[in-house]
Amino acid sequence: MTGSIGEMSDRARDVFRLVVEAYLDSGHPVGSRTISRISGVNLSPASIRNVMQDLEETGLLAAPHTSAGRVPTESGLRLFVDAIMQVAEPRAEDRAAIEALIDRGGPIEEAISNATAALSGLSACAGIVLVPKAEPVLKQLAFVPLPGPGLDPGAPRQAVAVLVGSDGSVENRVVELPPGVTPSMLAEVGNYVSARLSGLTLSDARARLGKEISDGRAALDQAAQELIARGLAVWSEDGSHRPVLIVRGQANLIDDEAAADLERVRQLLDELEGKEEIARLLDRARSGDAMKIFIGSENELFALSGSSVIAAPYRGRDGKLVGVVGVIGPTRLNYARVVPMVDFTAKALSRLLA
């Protein structure tokens, strides 16, 4: 027998499925007598023990030292999720609860936050949602020279780039100036941006600038063109690395079953504090259309706590990927119920944003 589902006998596949389902339901090691009492199982405890021993030798089950029962390994859980688990539509009450929290007629930000609360409450896990920081719409870009001590004030080396967004937000960044830039050129650049690029997102402004330069329609010399490009690039690069991560329901991770493994829970709660690392993990779920399921050590971030992440991307009005919604919980979570729940939540958010 091997760990491949195609090479497992029907008996081994049935026993394996029952062991995993019983473990995910109880969180405890599963013994042969437990399986033999399940309706429809026509095997003796001795026969079941032999099959479980074979499954342990293939690396799909493991026997904890404190129990005669077996638990699925991470490899076993992966095989179960990928090849055996039957996923159905979310229960009607789950769908109703998710929709009631998301579609309250309030701001989009509130709906997205409510999505994490819905998933957290229904799954008994921590609900998570990744929302990329909205790219500001440019209203004005100005440069204030910063002449250094002893330098020619007519040829500054640095400037403060002041970006004013259409929402009234103001941000400052220090940028290095290209050679040959004068204070009068800084004013000229500000006028050009206000006249030609105002009202565009940063990425659109950069694209417009590039096209006008290539078409020879930009009434700017090389230094001024480079200066605008540098100023826009500062925020474009910065904004793409500032996703907003919302985590709700961490208290759900401290339940009666977790009390026997407080060190694992403490480790998981510590990991949840590293929001930048979680955001990078979830960003992997934005790389495709399908849901992503990370089990235990399959992701380095949660390897120590042995936790699982189920995440699905959701889309905005233009069909582009907007963010990721999902849950973080123990590897023994109810995948068959939680997976369709996360998928439904992502689709509900997509419909709301469309």
Image (cartoon, helix red, strand yellow):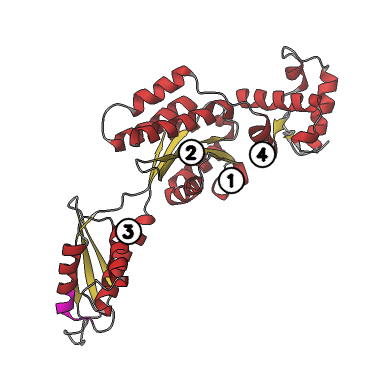
Q: Label 3 is placed on what type of residue?
A: Ser
Mark 1 vs mark 2: which is more N-terminal? 1
Picture mark count: 4
Callout 3–callout 2 Cβ contact below 8 Å = no
Q: Tell me the mark number nearer the camera, choosing from 3 and 2.
A: 3
- The answer, for residue 27, to whether it is visible in the render is no
Q: Position of residue 154 (x, y in %)?
A: 16, 85
Find the distance from the CA under tag 1 to the CA under tag 2: 23 Å
- What SS does tag 4 mark? helix
Q: Label 4 is placed on what type of residue?
A: Glu
Q: Nearer the viewer, residue 213 or 299?
A: 213
**Which residue is depicted at the point 72% across and 34% down?**
64
Q: Quadrant of the N terminus?
A: top right
Find the distance from the CA under tag 1 to the CA under tag 3: 39 Å
Q: Quadrant of the C terminus?
A: top left
Q: Label 2 is placed on what type of residue?
A: Ala
Residue position for label 3: 203
Mark 4 vs mark 3: which is more N-terminal? 4
Which residues are the magenta region? 181-186
Mark 3 vs mark 2: which is more N-terminal? 3
Q: Position of residue 157 (x, y in %)?
A: 25, 80
Residue position for label 1: 304
Left or right, 149 with respect to 347, comes to left
Residue position for label 2: 312
Q: Label 1 is placed on what type of residue?
A: Leu
Q: Tell me the mark number nearer the camera, choosing from 4 and 3.
A: 3
Residue position for label 4: 74
Find the distance from the CA under tag 3 to the CA under tag 2: 26 Å
